[in-house]
Structures are given as structure tokens and as C-alpha cells.
Image: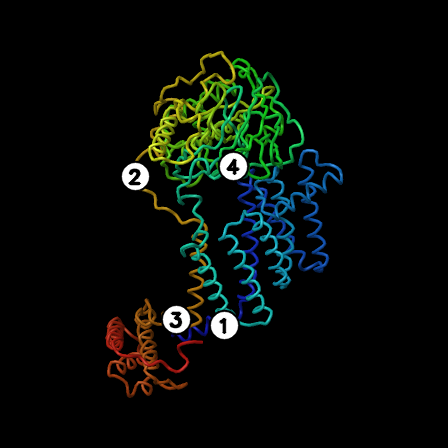
Amino acid sequence: MSAADLEARLGALEERMPTARLVALAGVALTLGAFLSVLHEVLVVVGDPEPLYYVVAGAVVAGTVLARVIRPRTAAALGVAAITAGMYLYVTSLPGGFGFLALLKPMLDDAAALLSGLSVLRIVNADVWALAAAPAPVFLAWYLAVRRRYVAAGGVAGVALGVVVLTGDATTVTTLSGALGVTLTAAFGDCDRRGERLRNADGVVVVLSAMVVLTLFVGLVPGAAGTLVATDGAGGGTSTVESSLVYAGDSLAVAGSVELTPEVRYTVEASDDAYWRVATYDRYTGGGWVRTGERRRYDGPLPAPPGRTRTVEQRYTAETSVATMPAANSPTEVRNVPVPVRATAAGDLQPASPLQAGESYEVTSEQPTAGSRELRAAGTEYPDEVETRYTQLPSSSPDRVEERTDRLTANADNPYDTARVVEQYLENNYEYSLDVERPRGNVADRFLFEMDAGYCTYFATTMVTMLRTQEVPTRLAVGYTPGQQVDDNEWVVRGYDSHAWVEVYFPDQGWVRFDPTPSVPRERTERQQLADARSDGGAGVDTNDSIDSEIDSGTPEPRTPAGTDSETVPGADGGRTPASGPGGGSDRDGSGGGGPPAIPLPTREQAGLGVVVLAGLAAAGRRTGADRRLYRAVWLRRLPDGPPEAVVEGAFHRIVHLEERAGRDRRPGETARSFLADSDERARRVGELYERTRYGHGADEGDAAEAEALVADLLEERSRLPTRLKPGSGSR
């Protein structure tokens, strides 16, 4: 088959197949896929993504079938009904979400918050919301696409994607993928409606590919924001422990290497030392933390924990401008605050605007004082809301974390002993270091099996994850350790006192603190940081009272949580756990042996970018004719396999192509002998072999070998000479 014959057949195939329609439908699917990928990630974090598959499949089937049955207005009404029913189910899943007014207010509040940048992950029942939001746009967009209303279909899918873009849950690549899908839908849908061939849209593909690639590469320009492709949180510049924890806001990403800052933040006067808590986080994403629930204006006392407590009175004075309001667990009352105060669902305090240097506020906290005997006897009758909210783990969490925890806590028969075993295991088996490489994937899994050291965020995140595999309600808390004691009831708190720890819920007792981070190396690092800052004459690292005071331990005296009894904890001997012991393995990374390092696979974003680039190159090649020239170059040098007759015929077609490239056109019906009469002797010989094959006794192996050698000789000779293309053959 000649190159011209092949091109003609491909053109006929293209005309028979509605290729433009397929690409337009693919564009709708791409935009919907970008939207659904965000919902899928939400469900992976907070629940099971499997129901989403059935919801989407049902919506696509319904859209396909009903496109032949109902009118667009009826379909639009069904879409509105579906989204209304979904949001009704979501709101009724919220605590107290019954009655019209009770339904309307949270629905409007959530809608306004989402459109102003509230992540879907911050919604309390995010899994219900995701499942409720999926079917209507999928059904309506696909229905319109099947009916060839491509612009409307792209608009519906684009609006759905726009919602998760506004919430901040869609990455740059996801957003660009959706935009690419909308443009493909409009461009190729127009081709389909006009009945034009696919090649007429090549220019659109080239422009779109260039747009996507150039947009992504903006991040490489000095001073430009963003990154080329999302890298799962790895890399980036060095931050401080304080900025990564207490100033994280509603979401906390586990960072890589961090530094300490010795600047003074607060002076605290208190009736007892404590960890000064800033925030708590309940939803673990695998790579960080999110705080769910709404904030309300503080307008009166907050509820105290159940059980026995001790009152801790505190007065905080800001030594610099600060945007946080620490308080000992659990704050019940705040007084004399110069700015409005908001309280989170977990009881954390937040100033509406930063406190300025010299401004102060007072807090009363009620700390649980139950001893270990009471905590062991607390049982597991957790409130439903606490159990659901504080035992959540991403569905993608590796099983080996639970398996390791099962082995470690095999002898613990209550949540308190389970927590103590995990706490002491992490404290005794991992080193403290600020210089770490942020792992890809699930942070707790990587720290537990593939890392030897980390800082407080890693220790606390891993402990929370391990306890949640045992169905123990646990949360991450961040704030400050007590700081430098400068008087009987006064402490100076610096930036390097920022810390992350664990709080475990016990029925009838409340939240109790556990701290798996090794305290001695952490305090040693802090002392050295302060000594270096003082010797360098650093500003703001001391107050008048702290200069001459001894730098003591910033951690309260160890106690069995809030008690005085000290029974032995089964399985927690305080020593390093051997590899063959409970929870041990053959090695830290759990690989069980050596072997060559795994070849890193590209991320989905990188793979998607590669597809876009390849599509752009292919379209550009088609537009310029480069694809045909490349094909012909390969075709010329590769004779067909098979019997001698096929080889000789293939050699003749290549001779014809070479002659046509030289400017000689073969007329319809012209014989091989006539066409090649004035050609090179080698070309005429191939023509003779061809005529003998077609009209004579056929060809043998010798004829095939001779024809192949003659063509190869001509190709080698003519490739060194300029080739004159026929007018118009270079592009179509």
C-alpha cells in the first residue's frame, strides 16, 4: 500500500467516524472528571469513595437514556430537584438539622462559606456533601452533551468545577484540565454540529496545549507564584515550627525541615504551668490536618469538661503583635480582651484581629485531673459525635499502620494503656530532629516505617493515627509549652516553645494530653537556639525578667495524666523496642530486604501534563504536515514483510514516491515502464521486476533481495541531495 493509499483510507475512516463528536464528549467528561476528582479526594479522606462510583454511573446512564426521551426543560427541572434533594439530605445529617428554618440557615451559611474559600474538608459531614453534590451536574451535563448541546453541557460542568475551585480544593492542574475540557467541548462540538472534519480543529488543540503549558511554567519565572506541578507537599523553603503550627489556620500541612525562632511572644501569669493550647485539629488528610466545624462569637462561658477538674487562672500579655490566643485546656471563660473573640466547636479561642504588644487578656480553664486508675476505668462508651469525628482516617491509609499498632498494644486492654504504649514506643524509638525531608504519601505511615527522626508534628500525627486505628478518639493539638519560668507563677513564652501534642478523649473525663515527642533533645535544641541568639545580640529574645533567669525545662513535670498513681503500663517498658518485638519488623522501612531502588512514577498531574503536551505536538504535526512527512520517511526505509511478491511491490511503490518527490507525476493508467523510462537505471530495474511480478511468473527470493537492495541504494544516494517537494504537499 502506498502512502497516498493509506492517507486516503484514513481520510475515509475519519469521515465515517464522528471523531469530532467523540472529542467533544471527551471534553465534557474531562471537565466532569476534574470536578469529580476533587469530590473523590474528599471521600478518600473522610469516608469511602466507592458510593461515588455508583452515583456517577447512575447519573451518566440516566443522562444517556433520558436524552432520547425528555426535553431539556424537564431535564433541568430534574437536575434542580436532584441537587435540592441532595442538599436536604446533607443538612438533615447535621446535628439539629430539622425543620425548615433549621435547614435553610446552615444550607445558606455553608454555601456562602464555600464560595468564599472554605474548603469542603472543613464541612462536618463532608462525605454526605460530596455525594449530594455529584449526581445533578453529572446528569445534566451528560444529558446536554448527548443531545449535542455542547456549550450548555460545558457550562454546567464548568460551573460545578468552579464551585470546588472557589473552595480552594481544586489544584492548578485540576482547574486547567477542566478549562481545557470546556474549550475542547465548545470547539469540537462546533465542528460536529457543522459536520466538519476533525483536522479543521487542529489549530484549537495547538493553542490549548500552548496555553496549558505556558500557564504551568509561569511558576518558573522569578517572583511568580505557584509551582509547576503539585508535588504532594514535598520540597519548598524552610519555615519555622511556629509558623507551621500555631499560625497554620484552619488547615495544617506537615512540613519538611523547619527552624526555631527565639523571639518572645507572650508573658504568662498562671496559677499552674500547662501547655498553652492554640488550636485542635480533628480531620486527618494523610498529608496534614483540617479543623472542621463552625466558629461563633464568644458571648459567655464555654462548657467545662465532665469529671474532676482543677481551675487554672491565666493572664497573657502579648510582647509583640500576635494573631493567636493561647489558653490552657479547657478554657471556660475569657475576660478583658481588647478585641472580639471567636470560639471554635472544640473550644479554642481566636481573636478577631491581632493583639498588639502590651495588650493582655485573662482566661479561666478547667483541666481534667483524673488519675490513671480512673482513666483505665473510663471505658469506651463514647458520644456518637465524638467517636465519628475523632476516629476518622483516610480510606487510603496503609494497613500496616494498624497491624503495627495491633502488635504493639496486644497486651493493653483499655484505651488509656493503649495510648501510653503508643506514646512511649514513639518517644523511645525515634529521634528528635528539625532537619527532615517531607515524605510523600501518608505522613504517619512514612514516619512509622521509613523515617528515623522528626519533630513534634510527626510524632503527634503518628500517635493520633495509630490510636485511631484502635478506635480511640484522638485529636492533634498545637500551641506552646510553658516556656521559661521567671517567677513562681510567671513564664516567658518564645517562638521556639511552639509545639504539637496529642489529646485523647475519655468518657466522663474529657480530653487528656499525651506527648510522644522526646523532651530532652527538644529542650536541648531550644536552649542552644536561645544561647546563640543572645550571643549574637538578637532583638526581642528576652524580657527584663528573663535575662537573668535560668533557662529551665519548658515541659511540665511528667505526671501520669493529671494524677498521682503510677501503675505499670503493659508493654510500655520505656526501652527501645527490638525489631523482633511487638510491632517490630525486619527493618524500619518494612521492605524486608534490599534490592534496586524503585523507579519513581509520575504523579497524575505530571502524567496529565504529558498527555496535553503530546496532544499539542500531535496536532501541530498534523497541522503542518510533519506527521505525514515523518510517516513517509519511516515508510520509505521499511519494506513490507511477507512473500517476495509483496517485497517487490513495496519496492516499486517507494520508487514511485521518490520520483514524485523529484517532480515527476505519474499519470492515471501510466505503465511502470513508461513512467520510469527517463529514470535512473536502478529505478528502471525495479520497474521491470514489478511488471514481471504483476504480469509474469511472479517473484522469487532473489528478485525480492535485488529490489530491496536497489531501493536502499537509491535512498542512501538521494538522502544526501536536496529534495524538491511538489507544490502543496507539505501542508494540508
Residue 715, quarter of picture: bottom left
- Judge whether 635 appears above or below 728 on screen: above
Q: Helix or strand or loop: what does disc 1 sit on? A: helix
Residue pointed to by mark 3: 626
Q: Mark 2 falls on what kind of element?
A: loop
Under mark 3, the amino acid is Ala
What residue is disc 2 on?
595
The location of residue 620, given as percent across then percent down, is 43, 68
Q: Earlier in the sequence, mark 4 or mark 3?
A: 4
Between disc 4 and disc 3, the foreground one is: 4
Please tell me which residue lies in front, 678 or 611: 611
**x then y, percent, for residue 400:** 43, 32
Name the residue carrying label 1.
12
The quarter of the displayed image where residue 442 is located:
top left
Q: Nearer the viewer, residue 99 or 476?
A: 476
Q: CA distance from mark 1 to mark 4?
A: 71 Å
Q: Amino acid at mark 1?
A: Ala
The reply to whether callout 1 and callout 4 are in contact (CB within 8 Å) is no
Give how far across and how far down residue 586 sits, in percent.
34, 29
Q: Mark 1 vs mark 4: which is more N-terminal?
A: 1
Q: Residue at x 59, y 72 (%)?
A: 194
User: For numbered disc 3, what is the local secondary structure?
Assistant: helix
Occupied quadrant, residue 577: top left
Q: Quadrant of the N terminus?
A: bottom left
Image spot of residue 309 (x, y percent): 58, 17
Residues under labels 2 and 4: Cα distance? 51 Å
Q: Is residue 682 left or right of residue 15?
A: left
Q: Residues within 10 Å of mark 3 (few under 14, many from 20)?
A: some
Read off the residue under disc 4: 322
Dot 1 or dot 2: first in sequence order is: 1
Q: Is residue 179 above or below residue 117?
A: below
Q: Give me the disc on residue 93.
A: none
